[in-house]
Structures are given as structure tokens and as C-alpha cells.
Image (cartoon, rainbow, N blue to C red):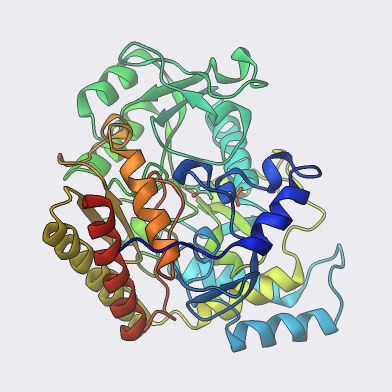
Amino acid sequence: MPVSLKDTRSAELFARAVHRLPGGVNSPVRAMKAIGRDPVFVQRAQGAELIDVDGNRYVDYVCSWGPLIHGHAHPEILEAVAAAAAHGTSFGAPTEAEVLLAEEVARRVPSVDMLRMTSSGTEAAMSVVRLARAATGREKLLKFAGAYHGHLDGLLADAGSGLATAGLPASPGVPAAATANTIVVPWNDPHALRVACEQHEFAALLAEPYPANMGLVPPASGFLELLRELATENGALLVFDEVITGFRVAPGGAQERSGVIPDLTAMGKVIGGGLPAAAYGGSEALMNLVAPAGDVYQAGTLSGNPLAVAAGLATLRMLDDDAYRRLAATTEALADGMRAAAAAAGVPVQVVSVPGLFTTFFSAEPVTDYAGARACDTEAYGAWCRALLARGVFPPAAQFEAWFPSLAHTDEHIGATLEAAAAAFADIAG
Ligand SMILES: *Cc1c(COP(=O)(O)O)cnc(C)c1O
């Protein structure tokens, strides 16, 4: 029996918001347009639970789109942020905590000996591209269709019509010149990748090692290894965008889990523990090209911000082996349960997961690339999400986003989620 959401107060706020904020929000996916409804305004959150301004309580699977691996308002993280804030919120001079965080990251991430902090993943991606171009003396970039590396001009590129063509601007306002040096190839397509590498000399091959911005579409067996091999052969740097996967799928991210080690890595989300922080890193030789050690210019007024660094450090310090085992078990229980619930309702889905991430694709066929993701029944996904919201589950409001379970999700949360999911599948099947 379909139920509906009480959202009077959210609707009131949204009506005011649209007059002052484009689309009523400060980042597009929050608008929930892709699932055919208006946004839910949040009042507060604790652990795995989110409470909206109408008093509805949800089990949250957005978790700020990735940063909150320990859930909302974790006491140790709040304490660390409060302690840092009491000493001053920003100095424009270095602090001890930045050294500690850099050491903590270098200890975990195989490719990272040195790093530079930024305030957002977009900035990290933009800066890592500049560094790769400076290091190689080349300009061309290879990226994969459906991969997201933030909203920088050069990487907001859609595939052209050929196998390995220059990217077309994916947004008005992106100059054609900005994407002319970006070659877009389909994910998991070894042939297209080889052809591109034969035709171009790249500064960087850029990849989300486990792409999670077209829904989660893991690499086919051997694909990351091929990427590594072709980068080296081409004279390009291999750049992994681990803004989502970093510190989530394993202590050292997808590179540790897969054993494929990039030259440079972009990090974000978990590294800031819910405050604005991101970073890019690599070997000493490459990172020492960055100013002021070298002459590749990149800077930031709030980079390495004390509050964000405190949150990041507290977040990483709580991520021990047991935490990763628990997060993997939670993810697996959810993914298995989703499969069973969909099957029971006769709804054809593909549930894809890696530890800490999963996507329920509304597709009868396995999804291996962006074309497959786009072929999903997004209407059905939207209807399912609306039903989930009405039943107390807060899903990522787009088929092309991953779900983010956290360490705060308990067996009770999992049980309630799967019960709601089963009912929501039944709603849309009937
Ligand atoms: C979120 C994301 C970014 C951009 O990070 P922001 O902090 O939103 O700028 C870059 N790359 C990937 C893979 C992401 O998921």
C-alpha cells in the first residue's frame, strides 16, 4: 500500500529557496529532480539517521555523498573540530595537524608520499591535472565516459560520436577549447582505450578506479591493469580520482584493494570527515614540482584548514581494520538484501557493490559502462526512491549515484532499510 511523505515545511522552505538559490539548492543533486520530487530540507542528523524539518526520520544512505564514513555528528569528530575551533579557525600559516594528516595519508595510500591539501575534490582534480601536464610537458587528457572529476571545465566533457574523439563541452559555458584536449572513451572498453593511446600522447589517463558517479560500475577484470600498462607505454601519468573510493573501499583506497598503483591520486570526501577538505598526492619527485618546492602554481586561502584537518584526522584514526571489516559486512548485507527484495517483487535490478558502496540499477542487463547505466529505467528508480523516502529511507536521489553505507548503520538500520525496500519494490511492481 503506497504511503506518502509529510513535507509541508520542506515545501515552504523550497518555495522561498527558489527565489534566492538556483533551483533552490547549492548543489544540483540535492534538488531531487531526478527522482521527480522537490528537495527534503534537513533539520539535523545523528549516526545513520537524518531528521527533516517536518520531523520525518530516515536511515540515511547519502551521508553527505561520501564524507561521513562514521555517520553524522560522531562525538569524537565533533570534539576534535570543537577543540580546533577553540584555538582559531584559520591562520594562513602551517600547523602541526597538517603534518600529522599528511603522514597519516602517506602511511595508508600506496602511491602517496607527499600531498597538497585543497578545499574541494574539484580543486584537487583541477590541480592534479595541472601537475600532470607540467610533469609531462603534454596537454591531452584521457577520461572515461560517465566518470566525474568535479566541475572543472576541461573534465566536463562528453564523449564525441567516434571511438576516441575530442570531448564536447558537457555544459553551456564550457568553451570548446577547454575540452578539445580531453579524449573521452567508454569505461571497460579495452579496444577504445588502446586506440586512444595509439592516437594521442597524453599527459594523464584519468580514472575513478571504481567509478561511482554513473552508479557504481567496477572495472572488468584486468581493466585497471591495462590502464596502468598503457599509461606507462604512452608516457602518460596514471591519475586515480579516489575522491569517493579513498579511505572507503580499503585503508589505501581502490589502489590498495586492486594492487594497481597510479602515479598521482586525487582524494576528497572522507579525508575531510564532513568538513571541506581534499588533497592530491604522489611521489616526492612529482609533488616537489608543486610551488613553492617547484614552480607549478597552486594555492588556497583555506587549504589545510584547521577544522577540516581535525575532522579528517579524527576520521582516519578511527578507520582501523575492524572498521573496514564492519563496513564491508554492512554493504554486503544491504546488497544481498536488495537483490532478494527485488527478486521477491519481480523487479529486474542489478545490485553492484564494493565495500562501502553499492548501486541498485533498474536494469535487466548487467551494467558495465555509462551507456548501460543510462539505459536503466530511471522512472522506476525515481518511483522506488519516492516510496523509500515515504518509508523512512533516504536514498541518493539519482540512478547515477552510489549509496553510501556508514559505520553508524546497525543491523537494525539494515533490517528497517530492507523492509522498506521490499515494500517500495512491491509498490512500484503493483
Ligand atoms: C565528489 C567528487 C569530486 C568532486 O569533489 P567536490 O568536493 O564535490 O568538488 C571529484 N571526483 C569524484 C570521483 C567525486 O565523487
Residue 30 drawn at (x, y percent) = 58, 51
Residue 37 drawn at (x, y percent) = 52, 47
- Classify 99 as above or below 117: below
For the question of whether residue 192 can be seen, the reply is yes
Q: Viewed as shown, does residue 298 lie left or right of 214?
A: right
Q: Residue at image x 37%, y 49%?
A: 383
Q: Quadrant of the N terminus?
A: bottom left
- Who is closer to the viewer here, 271 or 406? 406
Question: Total of numbered circles in the picture?
Answer: 0
Residue 348 drawn at (x, y percent) = 16, 47
Q: Residue at image x 33%, y 19%?
A: 196
- Classify 133 as above or below 118: above
For the question of whether residue 209 can be seen, the reply is no
- Who is closer to the viewer here, 374 or 260? 374
- Classify 120 as above or below 224: below
Residue 421 drawn at (x, y percent) = 29, 65
Query: For residue 73, what is the image quadrant?
Result: bottom right
Q: Viewed as shown, does residue 112 lie left or right of 3?
A: right
Q: Viewed as shown, does residue 341 lie left or right of 86?
A: left
